[in-house]
């Protein structure tokens, strides 16, 4: 028999296998953090800006098209206003898809890492 199985464990004492598992989880976290070293505050601001641009570009482009249509083909409806609403809607759907894809990637990455003990503190 091994030494672990012969000695009775005291409360709060962890087995060697538990310690190996915790160390493996910490190592995986450190390796992941090293791989994401470029994800700092500027990265977050850039992603925030990317979501904003994904809404702004379709809204501005379709509004400009609406202004052009209204200037060349006058009618009872405001194409500018209609295309502005459509552009904002398309931009919001675009941003929603992008954010949900990023969230899926983050959740998949978390599932790949081994679980840690809740009592573990760094």
Image (spheres, rainbow, N blue to C red):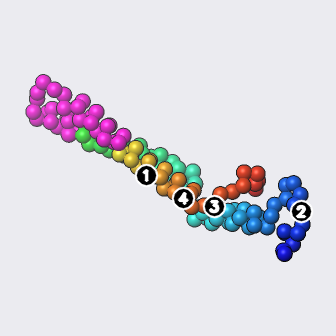
Mark nearest the camera among 2 and 4 is 2
Which residue is tagged 1? 101
Answer whether labels 1 and 2 touch (C-beta < 8 Å).
no
Mark nearest the camera among 2 and 3 is 2
Q: Residue at x 51, y 48 (%)?
A: 45
Q: Residue at x 84, y 68 (%)?
A: 5
Q: Quadrant of the C terminus?
A: bottom right
User: Can you give x and y, in whole percent of width and height, for residue 81 in the image?
Assistant: 24, 30
- Nearer to me, 94 or 15: 15
Which residue is the extreme one toward the top? 76
Mark nearest the camera among 3 and 4 is 3
Q: Eyeballing the image, is 26 above or below 71? A: below
Which residue is tagged 4? 109
Which residue is tagged 2? 8
Which residue is tagged 3? 114
User: Can you give x and y, in whole percent of width and height, for residue 8 in the image?
Assistant: 89, 62
Q: Residues within 10 Å of mark 4 (few under 14, many from 20)?
A: few
Give the quarter of the image for residue 77: top left
Which secondary structure type mostly characterizes the magenta part of the structure?
helix
């Amino acid at each position: 028999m091994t030494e672990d199985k012969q000695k009775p464990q005291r409360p709060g004492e962890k087995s060697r296998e538990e310690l190996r598992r915790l160390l493996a989880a910490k190592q995986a976290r450190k390796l992941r953090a090293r791989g994401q070293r470029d994800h700092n505050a500027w990265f977050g601001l850039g992603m925030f800006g990317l979501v904003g641009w994904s809404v702004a570009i379709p809204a501005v482009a379709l509004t400009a098209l609406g202004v052009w249509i209204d200037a060349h083909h006058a009618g009872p409806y405001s194409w500018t206003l209609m295309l502005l609403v459509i552009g904002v809607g398309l931009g919001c759907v675009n941003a929603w898809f992008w954010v949900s894809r990023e969230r899926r990637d983050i959740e998949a990455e978390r599932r790949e890492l081994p679980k840690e003990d809740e009592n573990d503190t760094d």
